Amino acid sequence: MSNEWPLWEIFIRGQHGMSHRHVGSLHAADAEHAMKNARDVYTRRNEGVSIWVVEAEKITASSPSAKGPMYDPSRGKVYRHPTFYDIPDDVGKM
C-alpha cells in the first residue's frame, strides 16, 4: 500500500472561456481537499470561475494509436455536422 495521497487532475474554466481546460495535477486525500488545494494553487490570480477535480485513476482515455478504428464509423455520418446551413451572426456561440 502506498503512503502517497491519490493524484487528482485539475480543470479550470476561465473568466472568458466556455469550457474547462486541464491546468495540472496535485495529490490530495479526497475530493474536498483536492478542490481547496486546486483553488489555492491554480486560481491565485482570480483566473477561474469553475474548478473540476478528477481522480486520475478514474480517467479512461482512448489511445492515439487506435484512432482509426475508434473514429472511422463517424466519417460516414456527415449529417451530424452543421455544414448544410448558415448560422446567423446574431445567434452567438452555440
Image: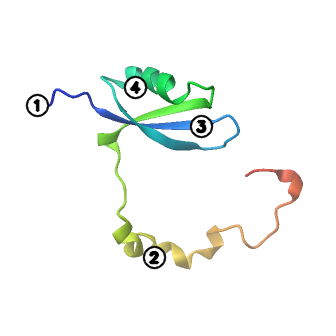
Q: Secondary structure at mark 1?
A: loop
Q: Earlier in the sequence, mark 2 or mark 1?
A: 1
* Mark drawn on residue 72: 2
Q: Amino acid at mark 3?
A: Arg
Q: Residues within 10 Å of mark 3 (few under 14, many from 20)?
A: some
Q: Position of residue 53 (x, y in %)?
A: 44, 33
Which image quarter: residue 48? top right
The residue that appears at 57% across and 75% down in the rendered structure is 77
Q: CA distance from mark 3 to mark 4?
A: 16 Å
Of labels 4 and 2, earlier in sequence is: 4
The dot on residue 13 is 3
CB under 8 Å between callouts 3 and 1? Answer: no
- Mark 4 neighbour density, 10 Å: few (under 14) some (14–19) many (20 or more): many
Task: Residue 12: give x, y in percent of width and height.
Answer: 54, 36
Q: Which residue is mark 4?
A: 34
Q: Is residue 83 left or right of residue 30?
A: right
Residue 10: x and y in percent read: 45, 36
Badge 2 amino acid? Asp
Amino acid type, mark 1: Met
Along the viewing direction, whichever of 7 and 73 lies nearer the viewer: 7
Nearer the observer: mark 2 or 1; the answer is 1
Tell me: 46 left or right of 36.
right
**Which residue is the extreme one toward the front?**
45
Q: Which residue is mark 1?
A: 1
